[in-house]
Each structure stands twice: as C-alpha cells, then as structure tokens.
C-alpha cells in the first residue's frame, strides 16, 4: 500500500477526547497491551498528530504520529501498527518468519507467499483469514512488515504451503517508514532462528525459498497457485496464446485430442476469459470508469464473443459475473470492483499494465461492425433494445461535478451521480458531526440545490434530499443499446407503454374474439387509451413489434436520404 508515494491531506494535533478514544480503541484492538503499556506508548504530555493521507490508489488512511514517527495507521476503521511500534512490542501480533532475500520483494509491493514462510519447530501461529500479522526475518525478531492473513492457518496447511499467505500493507523501507525518522530495525536475537541460521541446511533452504517464491509469483500470474479450480482457465488461455506467438506447429489430430479433453464448462471458462481480456484491451476506456459491471458484460464482453459462439456465464464454473470479477480482482488484480451504491457493483480501476493483459492478442475474426448479412439476420430474429435512464450534467449543478472531471453535458448513471456527490460531501467534510444523516449546506450546495426562498432558512439537508435535488436539477436522458451496436443516447425521457389485463363481465365467454375502444387519456395531451376486449395479449405484442419495424425502416430511409442529400 505504501510502496509508492502518498498525498497528505491534513496534519493536526489530536484533541484530548480523541486521544482517550484512541487509547480505548488500542485496548480493544490489541488485548495483549496493558493500560500501562498504552500510557507509556501514548503519554499525555507528548504531542500526538493525526495525519490524513491518500495512498497512491486513492485509499483514505489516517496516521497517528508521535515524535515524528508514525506509530499506527487506520484503514477501513481498523487500526494497524507500524514497524516503529512493533520494534517496541515485537510480540504484539502473530509472527510469520521468512528469509532475508524475500524482504526486497515485500518492499517492492509483493505479498508474502507461503513457499517463502519458514515454519518453526513450534509450528505456525494460529490465525484466521483477515487477522493482522507481522513478518520477521529468521535472524532477527524485529518485525519488518505488517499485513493481513490471506487464509487461516489450517488452510495454509491444507494447501501444502502454496499460494498467498499474507496481504502485505506496510514494510520497513517503504514510504510510510520514510515518513518517520528512517531508523533501522533493532537487533532482537531469536534462539531458534540462530540455530536455523547456523545449520548446514540454511544456505540451501534460503536459496530454495527465494527460487520458490519467484516461481510462485510467476505461477500466481498464470493462475497455478489459485485454490479455486475455476481459475485454471487463465493459465490455459495464456499458455495457448504463448504457443501461437512462438509459432509452434500442432497437427489436426493433436487439436482434436485437446478439444476432446476439454469439458463444456472448461470451454466456457476459456471463452469467458477471452471475452474479458478482449473487452478490457480494446473496448473499455479510462474515461468510462467507474463502469457498471452489468454494462461491462452487456455492452463490451458480449460484443467480443467470436462468431458462432454464445457467451453464457451460467454454463461456466463461475456461474455468476460477480464471482468471476471477484477472482479477476483478488487473484490476478486485473480490475478493482467496488460497490458504489447498495447492491450495485462497478469497475473502478483497470490494470492495463498487467503483463498478461498486455500480451493478450485480440482475435481478428471478432468484429462488431454491422454488415448487410447481419441486418438480414436481425430482421428474422428481433432482440429488443435495453433502455437505461441517464442524467446529463446541467449548468446549475456543474460545480458539484468538476472535481470528478465531469463537465456540462456529461451523461451519468444514477449510481455514478450518487457516488460523485457522496465523494464531494466527504472530501469537503460536510457531513454533520452531530447527526451523520444530514449534510451541511455550503455555498456551492446552496447555489446548486436550494431555491432562493430557502437560502436563509435551510442549513442542513438529508442525504436522500441531496441526491433527489441533484437528479431533479440535471437533464434527464436515456440510452438505447441494441445487441452488437454502439449505444445511442437520446434527450428527454421515454414515454412508457402501460399494458394491463383485467377481467370484465364475470369471465363470460363471447363469440366475438376482440373489440377495441379508443378514447383520450384524461389530463394528458396527445395521448390515447386503447381498450381491447378478449384474450389478445400475444396479438398486442405482435402489433407493437410490427409498428416498431415500420418505424425502424422509416428511420433508416431518413438516414439514407440525409446521406444522399435528399429531403423526406
């Protein structure tokens, strides 16, 4: 997390009440510390600073700095000790040992892999997934890294010490360490480590560990270390492409033999990964982020499916898009998925520099350009468009979106609007301290959301009022997405077609198959209500479809006429 420079947002001296709360949180987070230890660690007479920073990936982190050394950092409302604190209390956290060559990889931002962990004679410490742990070297008990357990101790054993062991958050010699006095770890001897270091097998074991860690990191990028069998398709896809790049010949018999070995589920996994890579490399642009996962699948991945094949996630080993993207995020770090609003996930970051993604070659046969043959097929089998409600930034609310690089006329999903407004309120610290359900109105919010008569009266608004007022002052529009075609954005809102079925006349059957009555809709201009008697639901659907085709052909005629310079 701190392998790259971070940005400092604020640096203030802690208040007395906040200091007491911090001590209580320390007692709760680290029960092994006594009240006397905490009083010695955070003396009342010493100045303690609270530093709010943004990590290089945008995570908001709070540092607690004493005598110019960061002792603690808070991430996602959880306290973690720094190496400066652990050097004073080395037994504060469960400890995992590793070899000195592995430290350089941890400093560079790598996680601690299980092949690089040294198993002492007393066994590994008992931890659960997500527990805070420290990392030491075999020749010194002074911790050099802090992280979270990727799996529990029992799972480490069942995996035969293969795969990822710890998600490393902070290391000696990273930028958080450099924020302090840059002191070196103390020399804390360990009897068992000294015996291990002096043994004849030490040099061999150290070299084997370094080699194994390098291999493990390579295997991880190709999917070999993943315990989930659904992830094995990535390795096969990449290895297949590597063989094609090398130009290695393969006979038809070998290809048929390989196809016979693949199950339908494995074939769908490979197709899903191919469409995923293709969409990230040639379809998704940085300006589109954050991108709804459903939109990514519908508009990008489906259009990358080769001709003659059909992409169906339910037939893959993942079963759901959310599980597939979770594997792509946690195991391979291709994307970062975040729930911007309740129940709605979006892709907020893509690692286009990933070597696996960069080495992927886009298949030449896949094309989404519309051809005359495709038009004939579409005439025979019609697929309705997907209509999505959007909002465009108006001049009145533009100041709220400038921080997100959204200018007047930019179109956004409602979830994106909610996310941007939430970030604006939090970044400007407008959440009411007494009641977090309310937002303090600053001059910008006043001009954008309030009416003139409210300027002197309204000082706070509920979160829901802030979102609803923002959407109400934006321009409504909608997006039409036809399969295999580029999205089309229209201004205004779509007038819905309401179809209701009701029983009349006590369900009596008549010889007359259908009758219809036309009458104007009360209170609505230029709208007509059509009442149809009889069971004609399917006929109504066909009628609407016929009208759609007529309108579509008429629009195509207008397009051709406009291109040829004629007027219709």
Image: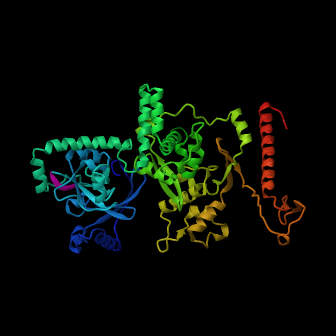
Residue found 52% across the figure and 56% down from its top: 345
Q: Quadrant of the C terminus?
A: top right
> According to the image, what is the colour scheme of the structure?
rainbow
Kindly tell me whether residue 81 is visible in this rendering: no
Q: Is residue 135 magenta?
A: no
**With 6 as the anchor, is 40 left or right in this view?**
left
> Of helix, strand and loop, which mostly describes the magenta segment?
strand
The structure residue drawn at horizontal position 71% and vertical position 33%, both measured from the top left corner, is 372
Position in image of residue 239 (x %, y %): 41, 35
505 lies left or right of 305: right
Is 111 on the left-hand or right-hand side of 444? left
| Quadrant housing residue 96 | bottom left
Q: Residue at x 50, y 65 (%)?
A: 430
Q: Position of residue 417 (x, y in %)?
A: 58, 57
Q: Is residue 529 above or below residue 286?
A: below
Nearer-the-camera pick, 343 or 319:
319
Q: Is residue 279 visible?
A: yes
Q: From the viewer's side, name the closer residue of 74 and 548.
A: 548
Q: Nearer the viewer, residue 456 or 378?
A: 378
Give the residues in magenta. Answer: 139-143
């Amino acid at each position: 997390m701190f392998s790259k420079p971070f940005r400092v947002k604020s640096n203030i001296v802690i208040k007395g009440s906040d200091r007491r709360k911090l001590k209580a949180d320390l007692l709760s987070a680290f029960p092994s510390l006594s009240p006397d230890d905490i009083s010695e660690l955070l003396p009342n007479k010493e100045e303690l600073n609270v530093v709010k920073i943004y990590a290089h990936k945008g995570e908001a982190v709070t540092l607690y700095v004493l005598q110019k050394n960061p002792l603690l950092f808070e991430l996602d409302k959880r306290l973690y000790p720094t190496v400066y604190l652990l050097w004073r209390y080395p037994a504060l956290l469960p400890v995992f040992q590793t070899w000195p060559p592995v430290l350089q990889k941890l400093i560079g931002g790598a996680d601690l892999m299980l092949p690089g962990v040294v198993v002492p004679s007393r066994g590994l410490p008992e931890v659960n997934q997500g527990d805070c742990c420290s990392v030491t070297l075999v020749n010194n008990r002074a911790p050099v890294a802090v992280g979270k357990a990727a799996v529990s101790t029992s799972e480490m054993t069942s995996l035969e010490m293969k795969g990822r062991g710890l998600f490393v958050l902070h290391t000696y010699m990273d930028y958080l360490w450099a924020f302090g006095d840059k002191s070196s770890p103390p020399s804390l001897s360990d009897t068992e480590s000294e015996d291990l270091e002096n043994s004849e097998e030490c040099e061999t074991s150290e070299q084997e560990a370094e080699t194994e860690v390098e291999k493990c990191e390579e295997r991880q990028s190709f999917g070999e270390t993943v315990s989930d069998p659904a992830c094995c398709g990535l390795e096969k896809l990449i290895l297949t492409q590597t063989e094609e790049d090398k130009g290695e010949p393969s006979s038809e018999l070998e290809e048929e033999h390989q196809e016979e070995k693949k199950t339908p589920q494995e074939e769908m996994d490979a197709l899903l990964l191919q469409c995923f890579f293709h969409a990230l490399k040639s379809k998704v642009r940085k300006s589109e982020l954050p991108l709804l996962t459903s939109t990514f699948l519908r508009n990008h991945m489906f259009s990358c499916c080769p001709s003659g094949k059909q992409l169906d996630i339910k037939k893959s080993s993942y079963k759901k898009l959310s599980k597939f993207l979770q594997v792509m995020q946690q195991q391979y770090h291709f994307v970062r998925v975040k729930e911007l609003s309740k129940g709605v996930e979006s892709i907020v970051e893509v690692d286009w520099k990933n070597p696996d993604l960069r080495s992927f070659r886009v298949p030449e046969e896949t094309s989404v350009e519309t051809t005359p043959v495709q038009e004939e097929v579409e005439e025979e089998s019609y697929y309705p468009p997907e209509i999505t409600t959007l909002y465009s930034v108006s001049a009145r609310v533009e100041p709220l979106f400038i921080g997100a690089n959204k200018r007047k006329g930019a179109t956004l999903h409602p979830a994106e609007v909610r996310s941007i407004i939430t970030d604006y309120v939090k970044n400007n610290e407008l959440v009411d301290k007494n009641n977090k359900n309310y937002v303090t109105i600053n001059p910008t919010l006043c001009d954008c959301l309030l009416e003139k008569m409210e300027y002197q009266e309204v000082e706070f608004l509920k979160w829901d009022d802030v979102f609803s007022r923002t959407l109400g002052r934006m321009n409504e529009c909608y997006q039409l997405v036809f399969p295999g075609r580029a999205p089309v954005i229209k201004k205004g809102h779509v007038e819905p077609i309401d179809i209701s079925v009701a029983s009349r006349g006590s369900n009596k059957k008549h010889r007359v198959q259908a009758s219809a009555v036309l009458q104007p809709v009360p209170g609505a201009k230029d709208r007509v209500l059509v009442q149809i008697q009889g069971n004609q639901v399917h006929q109504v659907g066909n009628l609407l479809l016929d009208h759609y085709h007529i309108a579509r052909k008429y629009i195509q005629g207008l397009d051709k006429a406009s291109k040829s310079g004629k007027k219709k």
